[in-house]
Amino acid sequence: MIDGVKVKKLKVIADERGRLMEMFRADDEFFEKFGQVYMTTAYPGVVKGWHYHKRQSDNMAVVKGMMKIVLYDGRKGSPTHGEVNEFFAGDQNPILLHIPPLVFHGFKCISPEEALVINIPTDVYRYDDPDEYRVHPHENEIPYDWARKDG
């Protein structure tokens, strides 16, 4: 696992009325601070990536559909430099993924319907000075192929 990345298995409590799932708490071991909460989606087969942040950590949970979330550690001097991690998150595997600064990340919707991600970053988005650095999803030096792996 990439240094600094944390995975929290989420517990779903269901009854005849519906379900409840806590995602992120101030008493979680990796809680740093609250910036904001936002929702993003991807349509089936769409890749959204790669990007990283210099200051903020992300805390992502897929609450509808399924996503393949991929991380790459490009941090020089990191004990896990060059490592790639894949996580399958969503309806079939409810997890919260903590992604530290400087770790590249992206996701691909792998469900037949639109997938929905809730992210709780440690910082607010600064429109005049965004902490977001993008890399092309397919043409880059990250050793990862977004194609489905059959077999």
Image: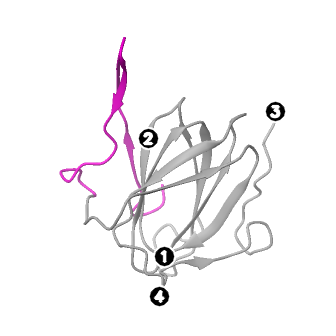
Lower sequence index among marks 2 and 1: 1
Lower sequence index among marks 2 and 4: 2
Tell me the residue at 68%/50% (across/down): 108
The answer to which quarter of the image holds residue 138 is bottom right
**Mark 2 burial class by Cα count in 10 Å: few <14, some 14-19, many 20+:** many
Q: CA distance from mark 1 to mark 4?
A: 12 Å
Q: Which mark is residue 90?
A: none
**Mark 1 burial class by Cα count in 10 Å: few <14, some 14-19, many 20+:** some
Who is closer to the viewer here, 84 or 126?
126
Where is 140 relative to 111, above or below?
Answer: below
- Amino acid type of the residue tagged 3 in the rendering: Gly
Tell me the residue at 23%/53% (across/down): 29
Q: Nearer the viewer, mark 2 or mark 3?
A: 2
Span colored in magenta = 1-30
Secondary structure of the residue carrying numbered label 1: loop
Q: Which mark is residue 129?
A: 4
Lower sequence index among marks 3 and 4: 4
Tell me the residue at 57%/74% (across/down): 74
Task: Residue 62 in the image: state x and y as whole percent.
Answer: 51, 43
Circle 1 residue:
53
Q: Nearer the viewer, mark 1 or mark 3?
A: 1
Circle 2 residue:
95
